[in-house]
Image (tube, grey):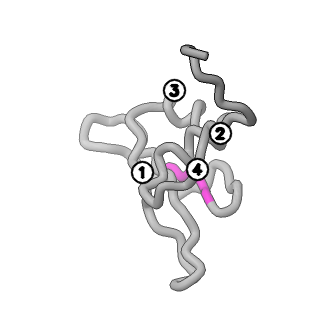
Amino acid sequence: MKVLLENYPYRFTENGLLDNGKPDYRIQKYSIETKRYRDIYLLDNSMQLCTAMEDVNYVRWLDPDGVPCYRRNNVVSPYS
């Protein structure tokens, strides 16, 4: 396993190659209870990896723990 970027509590890793010869990219999240990282999302390709590494809100959106993401300061109704 090779750590590409660590942005607490997330880190991005490359875990060898898949059966089709493409790199196996994963997002992992640190667990305070176990004091270890665990896989939370298996990425499809390098473009998705780059997006996740650049946009922390995208990672939060993929997080199965339901972390708030893409929040606005003001919500305006289109009907008012």
Residue depicted at 56% across the width and 38% down the height: 58
Measured in 3D between alpha carbons, the distance from the residue under mark 1 to the one under mark 3, in whole angstroms, is: 15 Å
Label pair 3/4, CB-CB below 8 angstroms = no
- Residue 71 position, x and y percent, is 65, 39
Name the N-terminal-most of marks 2 and 3.
Answer: 3
Q: Mark 1 points at which residue?
A: 41
- Label 1, secondary structure: give it: strand
Range covered by the magenta-colored residues: 10-14
Callout 4: 10 Å neighbours few (<14), some, many (20+)?
A: few
What amino acid type is highlighted by mark number 2? Arg
User: 4 above or below 51?
Assistant: below
Measured in 3D between alpha carbons, the distance from the residue under mark 2 to the one under mark 3, in whole angstroms, is: 24 Å
Measured in 3D between alpha carbons, the distance from the residue under mark 3 to the one under mark 4, in whole angstroms, is: 23 Å
Using residue 78 as the reference point, say whether residue 62 is left or right of it: left
Check residue 30 for magenta coloring: no
What amino acid type is highlighted by mark number 4? Pro
- Residue 3 position, x and y percent, is 61, 55
Q: Mark 4 points at which residue?
A: 68
Residue 59 quadrant: top right
Type of secondary structure dominating the magenta stretch: strand
Say which quadrant the C terminus sits in.
top right
- Residue 35 position, x and y percent, is 58, 82
Name the N-terminal-most of marks 1 and 2.
Answer: 1
The circle drawn on residue 47 is 3
Q: Name the residue under label 2.
A: 71
Check residue 13 for magenta coloring: yes
- Residue 49 position, x and y percent, is 53, 36
Of badges 4 and 1, the one in the foreground is 4
Using residue 60 as the reference point, say whether residue 40 is left or right of it: left
